[in-house]
Image (cartoon, helix red, strand yellow):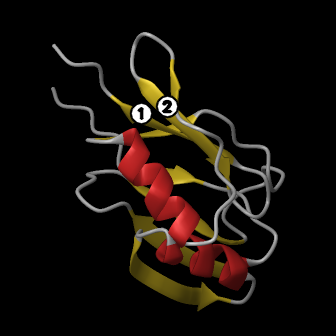
Amino acid sequence: MDIKLELVMIPVTDVDRAKDFYTRIGFNADHDASPSDGIRFVQLTPPGSACSIAIGTGITDAAPGSVEGMQVVVDSAEEARNHLIAAGVEVEPVVDLGWGKFVFFADPDGNKWAVQELPQR
């Protein structure tokens, strides 16, 4: 039996601001719909990923900014850092933690992300 993680809810205060942020850093805007009053569902996917995030209104009761530990994997942490800086994101320096090189950043609401470059094998 396959079990595939395909969607993670990210709570935000301003959907348009968050959508702009995530598309500016390279996520694809796959879906943006309001199927009923009080509901807006925006699905965004990092390039090459099988898992997407969802932001919106009426889709989660989690507090905006409460998500920690979201992680994406890239070929080069330094290139990812430079890309994020060019997109206007405050990014910490690359750090080597032994199990990979990492860059950390947060979205406008404070949801925390890690970008990992896997160690050479």
Residue 68 location, quadrant = top right
Q: Tell me the crowding category of disc 1: few under 14, some 14 to 19, or many 20 or more residues within 10 angstroms, Cα based.
A: many
Q: Is residue 121 above or below residue 14?
A: above
Q: Is residue 42 above or below residue 114?
A: below
Q: Residue at x 26, y 32 (%)?
A: 3
Q: Secondary structure at mark 2?
A: strand
Q: Residue at x 72, y 58 (%)?
A: 11
Q: Residue at x 66, y 64 (%)?
A: 59
Q: Is residue 72 above or below residue 84?
A: above
Q: Residue under label 1, please give it.
A: 116
Q: Is residue 86 left or right of residue 112?
A: left
Residue 79 coordinates in the image, percent (x, y): 37, 51
The reply to whether discs 1 and 2 touch (Cβ–Cβ < 8 Å) is: yes
Q: Residue under label 2, please give it.
A: 102
Q: Residue at x 41, y 70 (%)?
A: 26
Residue 37 location, quadrant = bottom right
Residue 40 coordinates in the image, percent (x, y): 63, 81
Q: Tell me the crowding category of disc 2: few under 14, some 14 to 19, or many 20 or more residues within 10 angstroms, Cα based.
A: many
